[in-house]
Image (tube, rainbow, N blue to C red):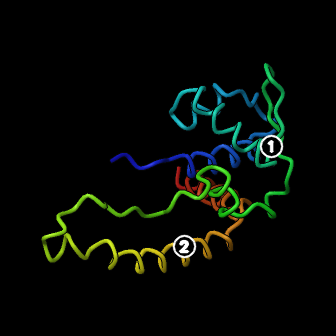
Amino acid sequence: MKVSTRFSDSIHILAFICIYQGKITLSSTNIAGSLETSPVVVRRLMTSLKEAGFIKTKHGTPDPELLVDPQKITLLDVYLATEGQTPLFTIDHNTNPQCIVGGNIQSTLEDYYHHAETAAKAKLQQITLQDVIDTILVKQAEKEKQS
């Protein structure tokens, strides 16, 4: 099963817009180059970010604009905008009910997964887009110092 990267790719797009605004053309092609994906994927994700009210775009023109201060966008906000109510963890419901493990694993994991998901969402609520941007810039400065 392939794990979705919509969440991390959406954070990437928002950080890219903030860091490169006014420095380069923010076309879906340029953003896709950073993500190493297709411009179509970028445009699809940007549609979700636009619907969430994070960015403003104009059809046919590059340079999306961030509408919300990066300090006010939490990672949980981005997660909900891109993944909706998709659970962080999924349980395989196609197991053998006659087996001790297969017959009890779903109800056992439900509680554990619920607690883990609640804790993860609480942590995502504490981290802002600005925190991510600041960390990216620090890591880049460290790389440049080593060169």
**As drawn, 50 above or below 37:** below
**Which residue is the extreme one toward the front?**
98
Determine crowd level at label 1: few under 14, some 14-19, many 20+ residues with C-alpha closer than 10 A.
some
Q: Secondary structure at mark 2?
A: helix
- Whole-percent x, y for residue 106 in the image: 32, 71
Q: Nearer the viewer, residue 80 or 124?
A: 80
Read off the residue under disc 1.
Answer: 55
- Pointer 2 residue: 120
Q: Position of residue 9 (x, y in %)?
A: 57, 45
Amino acid type assigned to the residue bearing label 1 in the image: Ile
**Element at label 1:** strand
Three-letter amino acid code at the position of disc 2:
Ala
Residue at image position (69%, 49%) is 15
Q: Residue at x 58, y 52 (%)?
A: 83
Percent x, y of residue 61? 81, 22
Q: Nearer the viewer, residue 102 or 138?
A: 102
Q: Earlier in the sequence, mark 1 or mark 2?
A: 1
Q: Position of residue 42 (x, y in %)?
A: 62, 33
The image quadrant of residue 35 is top right
Q: Residue at the location (47% across, 77% down)?
A: 116
